[in-house]
Amino acid sequence: MMKRMKYSIQILTALVLTLFLSSCSNDDDSIDTLNVFSATVNGSNLSDGLSNVALTGTIEIAFSHTLDSEAFEEALSLSDGQGEANYTSSLGNAGSKAVISYSGLNPGSTYTITVGQIALGENGESLDTGFSGSFSTTSEVEETKVPCTSATADCMEKIEVAEGAAVEFYSSYDIVSDQEFTWEEIEEVVIVIHGQNRDADEYFRYMTNAVGELGKLNNTLIISPEFKEEVNAADGELFWDNNWREGANSGNSGNAISSFSVLDEMVDYLTNTEKFPNLKEIKFAGHSSGAAMVQHYAFANTSEAAYPDYEFQYVVANNQYFYYPDGRRYNESSSEFYTPTDCTGYDFWPYGYETAPAYLDGMTQEDLLQQQITRNTIYLLGSDDTNTEGTLNTTDCAAILLGSNRLERGRNIFTFFETFYAENNQEKIEVPNVGHDADAMFNSDEFKSILSRD
C-alpha cells in the first residue's frame, strides 16, 4: 500500500513539473515576432537599388506591433561610407509606424538603414533577422530646407501688416527671413490658431507633431500666429484684448488693425506664386477661442474670393461662440428651432450680425450668409467636451442659447445649416473619448484624416 502511494506521488510530481515547464514554454512562445509591413523613402518603396533619392526627406517603416521609442532609437542606424547621417525619429499610427526625418545627406552616395535585432516592441517583440535597406542619393546638390519644429525662437518669424505694425508667428520654414529662396516643395499650408492662453508655441508643437506623423513636414508649411496682449507686445507689434478672436481692431494707437486682417496679410504673402509656385491648399484650424476665430473668419474674410485658384478649408474644433446668420436658435429640450424673446442682444456680434466689427464694413448680412453656406467648414467636436464648468460661458444668455456645452453647441450649429440650408458646404466630425484638449484633437486620427485628404 505504501509503495503504491509512493509511486502515485512520484507520478503526480512529474505531471506537475511537466505542466509547469509547459506553462513556462507557453509564456515564452506568447511573445510575438515583430514584422516589417512596409518601408518607404519619400513615398517610394524602399528596395535595394532605389536611386536618385533627395538629400532631405522622410523614411517611414510600418511594423506589426507598437514599438518602444527608446529601444527603436537605439536599434536604428542610417549611414553611408562617411558615417552616420543627420536624422530624427518619431512614432505614429499608435506607435507602430516609425517616421525618420533626415537631412543633409551626401550627394551621389549609397546609404543603408538598419534596425537591429533587439527587443523593439512595447511588449518585448523583436525582429527575427533585423531590418536593412539601401538607397543611393541624387548627385545634384541643391539648397534644401529642413523644417523647424522646436517651437522656440529658432522657428519665429515676423510679418509686417502695416508700417510699424508687425505680428510674430511660429513657422516650420523661414519664409520671411529668407527672401531669396523659392519654396517649390510647399504644396499646403496649415495656419493653426491658439486658444485663450495665447500659447502659440504649444499649438505649433501640436500641429507639427500631427503633420510629422503623416510624413508631410517637407511639403506642408505650418504657421502659428500669436495674437499678443499689450503687456507681451514689443514696440512695433500689434496687440489685442480678448476680442482678438472676433476680428476686432488692435489696441495700438494709430494702428487699429483687425485680427482678421492679419490672416488676410498672411494669405496675401503665401499666394505669391514666385515664392510659393506649387502651393494649392490653405487650411485654417483653431481650438476653443482659436476655433471661434476660425469660424468667424471663415465666412467673413475676402481672401478666399480674391484667390479662387486655391483650396481653402476651415477646421473649427471645440468652439463655444458660434455666429448664426439669423435669430433662430435650437431648443435641445424640444429638438426644435425657435426665435428667443427673453435675451436682449443675443444676435449681437459674435453671436449674430448686429454690432459687427469694422472689418465687415460694406458687407451685408446676406453677403455673410452666402459665404457661410458655401465655404468648406468642418466642425471637429470632442465627444467628451461636455463640461459645464471652467471656461464655458454659462452666464451670458446669448451664449447659453447656443447649447448646453461645447459639444452640443457644435452639433446645434451644424443641425441649423442642415435644416435650413441643406446645400451647405459644412461637415461635422466627432472625436471619440476626447474632451477640451487641443493636443488630443489635433493629433486624433479624425483630424489627421482631414490633413490626408486629396
Image (tube, rainbow, N blue to C red):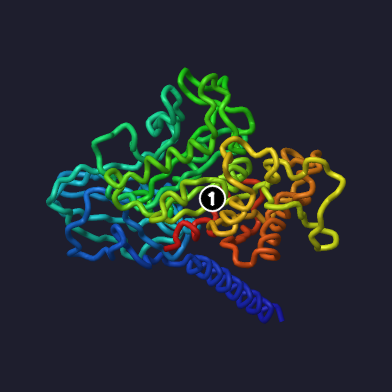
The quarter of the displayed image where residue 121 is located: bottom left
Task: Give the residue type at disc 1.
Answer: Phe
Q: Is residue 86 visible?
A: no
Task: Name the residue: 67% across, 81% down.
Answer: 4
Residue located farthest toward the right when viewing the structure as drawn: 342
- Residue of label 1: 442
Q: In the displayed structure, would residue 383 be above or below residue 264?
A: below
In the displayed structure image, the side of residue 52 where residue 381 appears, left or right: right
Q: Position of residue 175 (x, y in %)?
A: 33, 38
In the displayed structure image, the side of residue 147 where residue 253 appears, left or right: right
Q: Position of residue 147 (x, y in %)?
A: 34, 42
Q: In the displayed structure, would residue 255 be above or below residue 102?
A: above
Q: Nearer the viewer, residue 427 or 34?
A: 427
Q: In the displayed structure, would residue 336 be above or below residue 345?
A: below
Task: Name the residue: 57% across, 30% down.
Answer: 249
Q: Nearer the viewer, residue 376 or 108?
A: 376
The quarter of the displayed image where residue 393 is located: top right
Label 1 residue SS = helix
